[in-house]
Each structure stands twice: as structure tokens, then as C-alpha cells.
Image: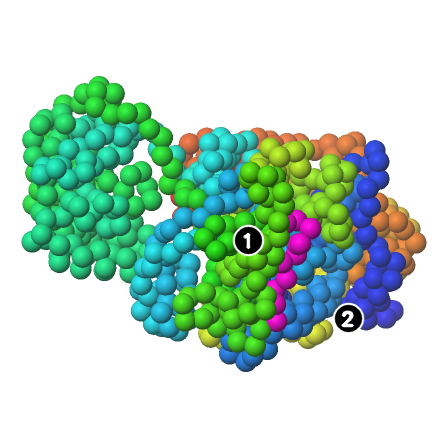
Amino acid sequence: MERYEPLKIEQKWQKKWEETEAFKATEVKGQPKVMLAEMFPYPSGAGLHVGHVRNFTIVDVLTRFFRQQGLNVMRPFGYDTFGLPAENYAIKTGTAPQEVTAVNITNFRKQAKKLGYAIDWSREINTSDPEYYRWTQWCFLQLFKKGLAYQKESYQWWCPEDQTVLANEQVENGKCWRCGHEVEKKKMKQWFFKITEYADELLDEIDNLEWPEKIKTMQKNWIGKSVGAEIDFEVEGGAPKIKVFTTRPDTILGATFLVLAPEYVGLEYIVSEDCKDAVAKYKAAALKKSEIERQENKEKTGVFTGAYAINPATKEKIPIYVADYVLAGYGTGAIMAVPAYDERDREFAEKLDLPIVEAELIDRDAYGTPKVTYRMRDWLISRQRYWGCPIPIAYDKDGNPHAISEDQLPVMLPEVKDYKPDKSGRSALAKAKDWLTVEIPVKDPKTGEVHMKKMTRETDTLDGYACSSWYLWRYASPRDDKAAWDEKAISYWEPLDYYCGGDHAVAHLLYIRFWCKFFADEGYLPFREPIKRLLYNGYINAPDGKKMSKSKGNVIDPLDVINDGYGADTLRTYEMFIGPYDMDAAWDTRSVGGVYRFLNRCYNLCFGNTSKVDKNVVVRNKTIKKVTEDIHRYSFNTAVAALMEYVNELYKNGASKEDLMVLAKLLKPFAPHLASEMLEKLDSDDEWPKWDEKYLVADTVELVVQVNGKLRAKFEIEVDDLEDEEKLTEMVLADERVKKYTEKGVKKTIFVKKNKLINIVV
């Protein structure tokens, strides 16, 4: 018998799949479909890492599972290529981002094929391909036409050294994450998408999504809907009145001071002359902090404005302060502080020795106009960078924006030699003099005649999130040169059935939902939610449990695992076996070896002597049922464990041809190369096997599951399973009914066999 040689087997089947276009998806009328995708990756020079492998393999297991069940399955692939890393590399080396991106994509594609993924490569997309971003620009123009893409001035993080705007997460301790220079807040005219127009629908539909509870909660918190009232406070001395937003207008009798955000519009008219220096100094310091820092800072700080307001309910003078725990974008940027009823106000009052009054509550509508406000802001999409999708706008001599006509798309990125922003803070596009001027058709409002007028192009590019807010729909018809997506193809394939990722829990998912609702309103999409089911996978950490990073030297390269002789099937199966898919797990090289030995045993069973006596009919049917149900509930680790137990039984009792065909078919989603080799040897198709209930008759009992003593779920289990506490605990913790109560972490589990009870302490 030949020995198991993973690399030889894998090369054979990868070649065969590529030559036959085995995974090409086409619309088949009347055949049930499934469409699956991962959050597409940024193709860095470092290539795929083990986190990618976990993410992509989850999608692949489901893809192959559904294919084996006879469904019409589409699993596309793409690359999120615009962004800072390629631009930074271009600035450093002078190498065009287009060149670097092409090399990285070639590497990623090669690696993905080496892992045996069932990808329809004819649907591969790349966001920096002009034929893709042509339609990103088209999407922008539809929003612009409806007033949902607009400009306004706002404060942004600015790095004077790199001459560019920075996102909140790119500011670390008041310094630029890239060059270490101190940042500042700069008022700039920027482009925004009006996502707040859809705030209520985005919020209302969350509970109907088949998504993890923790992600739904994060989305709700990000939107942050608050129902309250606006109340006007007169300012002593004739300064403009201050309008505050509060969710507790009934506590106004206890309001003992007002607090304004450092960026409060009109602050200069309120501050007294002798307090101006102190307020200016405090404001400058506050503008160096991110909003996250300001909200999470436990030590409350603030400064007196020297001014007083009149409480409309008590008619008493109350002082006005500036404090950075109040944010300009939330409500009106001003709050009435009621320290007796609000913890943050109390901390501030105690620190500054301000009065705390426990007053009676009054009618909510007595002094306030009902008002709803949201924590979510409109989506800032301007970037002063070269390597992004050009915004299809040009300006006339008066600075008014005009849309580039759709027949002039794409607005191509010009070739430049210097990728750094210019001294004014504009992107490198401002240096492309020949590109800057464009002729735009303009209709005369009086005569109706159309004239071509010379204008200046927008030099900002779009935030990368814009490119990834519609790519799922492009997968339906990726080579369409007449439309962003084909109406018939979209109606057949979408919305997406399964979306898998381990990042972008809030922003990306909100943005893609926002665009979906907008394009549905415009008649371009026949659905309002883009993603039916979301699987949010955990990270693979280093063996010591720490996050992998190049600087720590603890990164595991998946190609090293493959090329060391373990092969892609071992890597794939190990990453599904490492633990529940949605929990972080530490890499364990010894366990990789254990999975390799398991696959080797599968190979030896198939290519050794088969038994003519069928002794495993019961265990075979139980295994089919177990693996099928485990995959359906995304419990991939327990499915692999069940296959390992099945192989143990086959070694004990001898394996018939039927046993081996079932093993190969159940193994194929996890280890497709080996399984295909086994099925070829057995002269078998790969149709997913069905179990026969008559072989599953067994004594069962009810297992009760509690979380912190409260009943949360009941399971019907076989009596024999009461002997395996580890298996039961793993099954319970992976169940959706239990997981939502254990998201904060499990301290311990208590198994009481006598009472058929598991109590989880969180």
C-alpha cells in the first residue's frame, strides 16, 4: 500500500479542478441556490495568514457541504485593494500602488488555490480595477443625485507632517500612528454620505437579522437612538440661548449647571473675557483626544466659561462649563447636568464642588420639545490620498460641485511620480495638472441649452468602505459593462445567504445595509437587507495565547504548515477542529500533528483491505446524522471530532466499502483533496449521505442547561453521552441558545450527571 502523500494528492486535484472549472456557478432555473462569501481581504505583501485560513475555510466547508447536497452554489472571491498600506509603500519606494497590488493579488490567488478552495475564479473582483471603480463612482452619483452625498465643513484629525487627514483609529496618544508627529484638529470641507436618513430602518430591522447577538447589539449601540427633548436655556447677558438635548426632561428641577462640548458652535459668544484663555487652552487639549478617549476617560475635567444660564423651571442662575465628556456631534453639543440622576454629571460635580440637588420629577413635556437624536453620524467619505477611488465631481469657478456625467466614467487615477499629499493638504492628485481640468456639460437654466464648461476635478478619493459597500452585488455579474449589477442575476443569487468574517463588526455592515436600502428605494435591488446569515469567527492566536504579529515573531505562515509535509487538508481540518468557530483559539503545533495522523488513518483505511462484513451500520448512521446536524449549526469542531470517533470504530470493527464511502463524503468539506482521492478509489460520487432513522433508536434522556442557575436550554441526548462530560460541555457551549448568554466569557462549568444537568457560570 502506498503511503499518504498530501502534497502529491493535492496538486493532482487542484489541477483537475482548475482545468474543469469545477466550481463555476451559473443560474439554473428552478434549482435551489446558495451564495456564500467571506469579507474580502486586503492583499498585503505578507500573503495569507492563518486567520485568513480560518475565515476562508468556514466558507469553503459550507460551500462544499451544500454542493454535495445538490444545491446550486456560488462562492466568489475578491480583493479590497485601495488603502494606506500600498500608498505608504509607494511613498517610501516610488513603486506604483498598481504594481504592488497586482503582485500581491497574484500571490493571494496562488495561495488560495493551494488551499483547495471551491472558488468560482471567473467572478474574481478587485476594487482598484477601473472596471470595478467605474461602478463605485456610479453608486456615488446616485447618492449625489438624491442629496445623500453632500459636503460640509467639519473638524478632522490632521497630521501636519504627512499632510493628511487621519481616521480616529490612526491617532495614538495624540500622535500620528505613522510618523509619530503630534496631530491637530483642522476644520475642512469634506464629503459625507447621509446614512442618518436611514437610521430608524437600520435600527428597526436589526432584530430580524440572523446574526450573532453581540454584533446586533454593537450595531444598535453604534446607531444609539435616544428619545428625549430639547430645552432652551437663556444665557445671562444676552448671549445666544443654549439648546440642550436630554433624555430626562422630567429631571430639570435638579439641573444645577450646563456643560458644552469644546467644539460647541457659538462658544466664543458665551465665554466671558477673563475666561477666554483658559477655555481656549482646554479646547486645544480636548481636540487632541479621540472621541473614544473622551468617553472612556474616567477622570472628568472641565473649565468654567464665566457665564451663567437661567434654568427655565427654577429661574435660578446656573454656571456654564466646557467639558470634553460632552461630544459636539451628539444631540446639540450641550447638556443640562443633573448630578443627582446621572453618574457622569455627579463625578463632574463632585470634582468641581458643584451642587447636587435631588429634586422632584415633573411632566416630561413641561419645558421640552420632543426630540429624537442618534449617536451615529453621517459617514465621512473624503480621503486626501492618492490610492483610492476618485470622487466623480468637478468644481466650477465659483466652487460649486458638479457631477461627472455617467458616460465619462470611470474617472481614472492618473499616473503620478510623487504620491505624497501636497503642502495644502490635498492628495497627490492635485499634482496631476493635465488630469485636473475636465469639461462638464452644463444646462443653461434660462435657455435649456447644454454647454461644455471647463472645471477642476475633486482631488479627494473615496474611503475604502465605499468600495466594499456594494461588492457583493457585483459578484452576481462581475464582467457586466452596462450596469453595476445585472437585474436577473441579482434576483437569482441574492441576497447573500452566508457572510463570514472576523472584523468590521459595525461600520462595514452598517454601510452595506445603508446602500442596500438606498438602492432598493431607487428600484435597483429587489431586497432591503443584503445578508441573510452572518458568521463572525474568532481569531487564531499564537501558541502562548497572544495576538500574532510580525514584530513579536510569533506569526504562523500557513504555507509553512503545508510545505512541511502536512498539506492543505491538514491545515484546513485543524483550523476547523481547533475550537468553536466563533471563539478565539491558540495555535497548537502538536494538535496539527494529531489531525495529520487522523487523515493518514483515513487514507490507510481506504487504500488498505476492506471488510466484507458490515458491522458499523448503527455507528455509520449516527455519524451521518451527527456530522450533518453539526455543520448545519456551524459546529465544525464537533463534526470533525465525530469523524475521528467514526474512524476509531472502523479500525476496531473493520471498514466496509459503504463505511469508507460515507467517511469520504463526510470528510470532503474539510479535507477535499484526500476525500476526492478516496472517492475516486471507491468509484463513488460525492452525494451527501442520508441516515436511516431505524438505526438510531436508542435510549435518550433530557439534559438541562442553566447559566448562572437560570434555565436556558434543554437537549435530548443519548444515555451513553452522559459518560462524556467534555463532549457534552462542548456541544452545549456551541449551541446558539446558550451562546448568547455566555458572550462575556465562561468562568466554569458544573456537570451533575445524576441530575442530568450542566450549570455554566459566567
Q: Above or below — where is 723 with respect to 42?
A: above
On residue 393, the disc is 1
In the picture, the quarter occupied by the C terminus is top left
| Within-10-Å neighbours for mark 1: few <14, some 14–19, many 20+ | many
Q: Is residue 422 left or right of residue 139?
A: left
Sequence-first disc among 2 and 1:
2
Residue farthest along the bottom direction in this orientation? 93
Residue drawn at point x = 10 percent, y = 48 percent: 272
Residue wearing tag 2: 7
Query: Distance between the Cα atoms at labels 2 and 1?
Result: 52 Å
* Magenta span: 405-415
Horizontal and vertical percent position of residue 157: 36, 60
**Residue 38 appears in view:** no
Residue drawn at point x = 79 percent, y = 61 percent: 673
Q: Amino acid at mark 2?
A: Leu
In magenta stretch: residue 411: yes
